[in-house]
Amino acid sequence: MRVLIVGGGAREHALAWRLSREDDVEVIGAPGNAGIASLGRVVAVDPTDAGQVVALAKEESADLVVVGPEAPLVAGVVDALRNEGIDAFGPDREAAQLEGSKIFSKEFMERHDIPTAGFSVFDDPDAATRYIEEANRPLVVKADGLAAGKGVIVASDAGEAVAGVDRIMRERAFGAAGDRVLIEECLVGQEVSYHVVSDGERFVALAPAQDHKRAFDGDRGPNTGGMGAYSPPPVVTADVEQKILDQVIEPTLRGMAEEGRPFRGALFVGLMIVDGEPMVLEYNTRFGDPECQTLVTRWKGSVLPLILGSAQGDFGGLAPSWEAPASLCVVLASGGYPGSYEKGKRIRGLEAAAAHPFVTVFHAGTALQGDDVVTSGGRVLSVTAIGETIDQAAERAYAAADEIEFEGKQLRRDIGWRARSR
Ligand code: AMP
Ligand code: GLY
């Protein structure tokens, strides 16, 4: 079976790595990266250009297309593939609105009684500013549309919130994604990433995970795409998990089906656990990155029936099981990320790191330059280890991460701190 993987991050490398271990699976990266190139072939395409993706899938006679990132989903790449009779993993454009429009997702939660922070919607910056000044309490300002993870401002005071509105609505830093803003109550608690895979009707719950979004140790510094993750986080007790399933996952999938946009693909719910109660921060209509790296390395047995069943809209009877009790992923980033950074730095030590048992090194922003692997993005590598405990997975991941060198290498030393004994 030929599987085309759309995207080029560590998440896509992790999916390609896992799928390439299945019997008779051949993977093709579109556009991929240096890591995916080592598993199969890569072809340069624009992942958000449905025409290019469909043409490539046909040219390669792909049996299945797995779409990794959100932008192609929101752009309707899955719809275009299905129109041509090609099986595609991921939601169609209508279902991807759960991530593509934050206002749609909040109003959806309101319609279906799904717990989330209180909110107001504004299409006028003056009205938004007045609201913030009158509220005079911590608020979160969000651009409605996709903004590559940068359209959310968690404001500590009214000044910061107003500056957020100015940036989104007046300076139009995210273009049309900022036509409307959402202003939310600020929640305080622990964040958790909860993933399920659905075929539009049924779902399979994956293990919970926890991301580390801030750039620096101690959860300080600017927000990033994610500097590391681990699974499972202790805050998700059996009781909390049951509430997530009953209060969030079930009503979300039922609501989407009832509204005529059944959700197929990976649904990743970002939650704040506030005093043991799950509250939805956001929906993502794809796997998290770096959460995906921690999930696929723990997974036991074949993942293909799950991915293919979801793509075709019909699961068999599937129950996931976990090979490793714990996993942890450390992201190696370019110096300066998430701000500006240099590219083209030669990466050394990849083989030595990969030789560590229980460790897999997934590539994100890497490229081949002759025989060398060089940096080509902000997040460069995802060093992921499995273990009997989070402590053991952390020790293994950091030992391997320390083998890898490139100029400006930046990493957090405290990934998994909530679950580690030191
Ligand atoms: P989002 O893309 O909506 O998940 O927002 C990005 C990040 O902003 C989240 O991962 C949280 O850390 C933070 N955030 C979003 N909404 C809230 C909220 N209502 N209260 C507190 N923090 C939030
Ligand atoms: N790690 C967070 C995300 O993928 O959105």
Image (cartoon, rainbow, N blue to C red):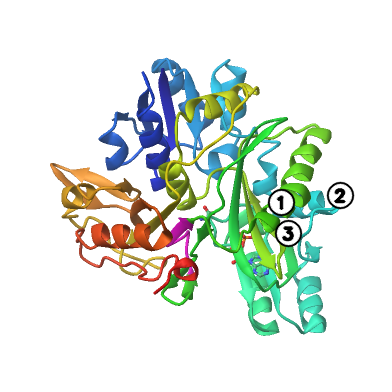
| Residue corresponding to mark 2 | 111
Mark 2 and mark 1: Cα distance apart in space? 21 Å
Q: Residue at x 42, y 66 (%)?
A: 415
Figure check: 148 above or below 30: below
Label 1 sits on what residue type?
A: Gln
Label 3 sits on what residue type?
A: Arg
Q: Secondary structure at mark 1?
A: helix
Residue stretch in magenta: 223-230
Where in the figure is residue 331, as x and y percent of width and height? 36, 59
Mark drawn on residue 65: none
> Which is nearer the eye, 359 or 293?
359
369 sits to left or right of 9:
left
Label 2 sits on what residue type?
A: Arg
- Which is more N-terminal, label 3 or label 2? 2
Ligand number 1: quarter of image: bottom right
Decide if residue 262 is in sight here.
yes
Mark drawn on residue 180: 3
Is residue 127 part of the magenta span, yes or no? no
Mark 1 and mark 3: Cα distance apart in space? 34 Å
- Mark 1 or 3, closer to the camera: 1
Figure check: 119 above or below 175: below
- Which is more N-terminal, label 1 or label 2? 2
Decide if residue 378 is in sight here.
no
Q: Residue at x 42, y 60 (%)?
A: 390
Quarter of the rendering occupied by the N terminus: top left
- The image quadrant of residue 421 is bottom left
